[in-house]
Image (cartoon, helix red, strand yellow):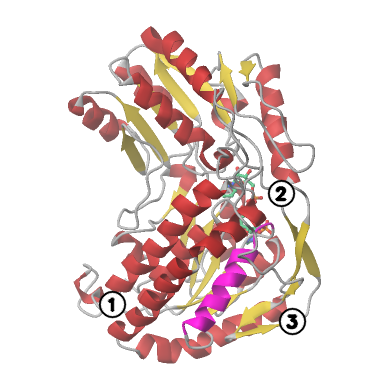
Amino acid sequence: MFEYAPAPESRDVVDIQPSYGLFIDGEFADGTGKSFKTINPASEEVLAEVATASEEDVDRAVQAARKAFGTWSAMPGSERAKYLFRIARIIQERSRELAVLESLDNGKPIRESRDVDLPLVAAHFFYYAGWADKLGYAGYGANPRPLGVAGQVIPWNFPLLMLAWKIAPALACGNTVVLKPAETTPLTALLFAEICRQADLPPGVVNIVTGAGETGAALVNHPDVNKVAFTGSTEVGRQIARSVAGSGKKVTLELGGKAANIVFEDAALDQAVEGIVNGIFFNQGHVCCAGSRLLVQESIATELLDSLKRRLGTLRLGDPLDKNTDIGAINSAAQLAKIRELSDAGELEGADRWSPACSLPDKGFWFPPTIFTGVAQSHRIAREEVFGPVLSVLTFRTPAEAVEKANNTPFGLSAGVWTEKGSRILWVASKLRAGVVWANTFNKFDPTSPFGGYKESGYGREGGRHGLEAYLDV
Ligand code: NDP
């Protein structure tokens, strides 16, 4: 293996303030509640002090969004589009700054925030800007109306990308928003607030309230919110579904997953190995649609696993700001504890654990890429979302068995199929109960493509023309 000299991205491009307030009605304002610290998970360095929005603050933000809704929704779509295009272009112009800040606050490698997250964030704003004046042609009636104020709660794994998935379609359709970023990753949402000001977005159209679960609950339960959009754990998704039931609020929930990545014996193995690595080790496995269950046909299992292990030996774990880094830091101490607990359970239940030789930095939260073989379907690591760089390997003999095992999960967000036969891809895809099925690739995202789940992975679709429906009164 090559020796790589460090190639750190400079953090001088970001200007992190010591403390941040809330973004309400176009202004940064102090919160009436306490504050919390956001840290760099790769070093445990405190990055900034951030306000916790109280119920009262959330109420102010919802009122600001309500006030702005009148003019924003009455504006011609072509005018709203100009703001969205402007935001998209500023995101492109400031993409290096946003990528560095995302890596600092989240722990993800700069290579991913720079080359995956940020281009997709800009693409989402460009894409939905294009819809703003064509809503009458989207298949939801000649003059579809927006819903009103959208309360949006997002997780920490793709902070800015989840913000774009939520805010871009909401604004294109004429809604105004109050968004709560995750407690561990508030900084890029606050920089996005600054971008809204730079774009001269009318005050109150976008409001950002930072805080923990209580702030999220206050937002979701606010009586003047018309639409709730949530991405996060199935457990919190269930609570939200219960709390808004009967309220008349429109809801979309994008929850967890336990995707099967199915490799048939006729697959191009080197490509499959890359796809497996991308499927589970991208973003440290903090991906709801991660290919966390590898289903490999028994006849090629040994050969495939040998190649996979060799490939894992070449992954570089360490400083997220180093451009050579493949695997960054785990986002928080709590998430690291969860990954450790589930991995220990895997060993206790009898699966074989393997990681490449890999030294972990002394400070920060780290977990090596890990493979479990000899996994039974009943094991916790085969059933529960680990949300970390941990792959469970199961084998199958026939296509029918592969489908049966792939569908044997309470989730249904995504899946992957590796085979050279197009007919087999179509057959398997038609049998899988998963919102997205990738064929001979994995973790490919595009703003034009709808995304969402079956069963406990939630309901509603985000992205594409389908993603408009969630923000229209149809
Ligand atoms: P949560 O579902 O708790 O967090 C998602 C968002 O919801 C955060 O902004 C969170 O705030 C907020 N929130 C928490 N409680 C409430 C509530 N009662 N009402 C409204 N909003 C609330 O996920 P965690 O961060 O705790 O992660 C736990 C597990 O969830 C992970 O290990 C993973 O398995 C799964 N997960 C799945 C994701 C996905 O994309 N499908 C994304 C993230 C996690 P706060 O940040 O303060 O907790």
Which residue is pictured at 50% across the width and 47% down the height?
Answer: 112
At which x and y percent is residue 50? 74, 69
Say which of marks 2 and 1 sits in front. 2
The three-letter amino acid code for the residue at tag 2 is Pro
**Among the two numbered marks 2 and 1 on one chain, the one whose residue lies closer to the N terminus:** 2
- State the image quarter where residue 463 is shown: bottom left
Residue 104 versus residue 398 in the image, above or below? below
At which x and y percent is residue 3? 59, 28
Element class at badge 1 = loop
Q: Is residue 261 magenta?
A: no
Cα–Cα span, label 3 and label 2 = 26 Å
Cα–Cα span, label 1 and label 3 = 37 Å
- State the image quarter where residue 437 is shown: top left
Evaluate whether residue 407 shows in this view: no
Specify few, some or many for label 3: CA neighbours under 10 Å numbering under 14, 14-19, or 20 or more. Answer: some
At which x and y percent is residue 248? 47, 71
Task: Tell me the residue that label 3 is attached to.
Answer: 30
Task: Tell me the residue that label 1 is attached to.
Answer: 144
Say which of marks 1 and 3 sits in front. 3
Element class at badge 2 = loop
**Among the two numbered marks 3 and 2 on one chain, the one whose residue lies closer to the N terminus:** 3
The disc placed on residue 232 is: none
Q: Report the magenta residues as a range.
A: 184-199
Task: Tell me the residue that label 2 is attached to.
Answer: 41
The three-letter amino acid code for the residue at tag 1 is Pro
Is the distance from the Cβ of mark 1 to the nearest ligand 1 atom less than 8 Å?
no
Element class at badge 3 = loop
Q: Is residue 300 left or right of residue 231?
A: left
Q: Are marks 2 and 1 in contact (CB under 8 Å)?
A: no
Q: Examine the residues drawn in magenta and state their main secondary structure.
A: helix
**Among the two numbered marks 1 and 3 on one chain, the one whose residue lies closer to the N terminus:** 3
